[in-house]
Amino acid sequence: MERICLFPGTFDPITIGHLDIINRSLDLFDKLVIGIGRNASKVSMFSEEQRLEWIKEIFKNEPKVSAVVYEGLTVDCCKQVGANYILRGIRYVNDFEYEKAIADMNRSLDGNIETIFLTCLPQYTSVASTLVRDVIRNGGDAAPFLPEAVRKSLKK
């Protein structure tokens, strides 16, 4: 059976912290689908189309990686893409507590889906999309936290 994993998030924007988790997970799975989730309770800074374009550009030479936009339950997206695994990145202990609760709910909804947690490297613990958006919104230099494809498009 093929090991297909969904990495869900808003990726608003995708950061070098996300890339760390994605790149380190590639040896674990046959395919990794980055799921850009629509979150009705959040107002995005960047359009879904822009975020999808960034991901496609960043991973254009990595055949294991694809991306989709989805709405609703993450386990339903897993079914749509054939994933039996969900990947989540952990920066701090409180991330784990929050993510474990979600993993337990997902397992209750579909017992065939397992959540895999990867801790980020220490240099990326402070890199969060929320903080990066604040830097961008307030005219700061977010370049050190962003992949090249995102940096280039923000310069325009």
Image (cartoon, helix red, strand yellow):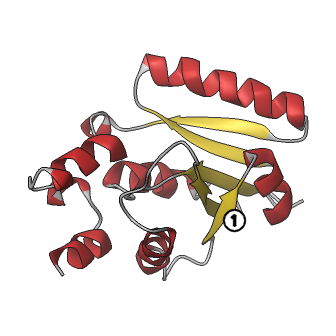
Q: Position of residue 150 (x, y in %)?
A: 29, 70
Q: SS of the residue at dot 1?
A: strand
Residue 121 figure quarter: top left
Q: Quadrant of the C terminus?
A: bottom left
Instruction: State the count of labels.
Output: 1
Q: Nearer the viewer, residue 137 or 121?
A: 137
User: Would residue 128 be visible to someone looking at this image?
Assistant: no
Q: Please report the residue visible at 15 percent of the width from the left and 76 percent of the height from the top.
A: 155
Q: Position of residue 78 (x, y in %)?
A: 79, 54
Q: Position of residue 4 (x, y in %)?
A: 75, 59
Q: Nearer the viewer, residue 52 or 117?
A: 52
Q: Please report the residue visible at 50 percent of the width from the left and 52 percent of the height from the top.
A: 10
Could you tell whether 62 is left or right of 28 in the image? left
- Where does label 1 land, which residue? 31
Going by the numbered disc 1, the residue's amino acid type is Lys
Could you tell whether 88 is left or right of 134 in the image? right
Q: Quadrant of the N terminus?
A: bottom right
Q: Position of residue 38 (x, y in %)?
A: 60, 55
Could you tell whether 87 is left or right of 61 in the image? right
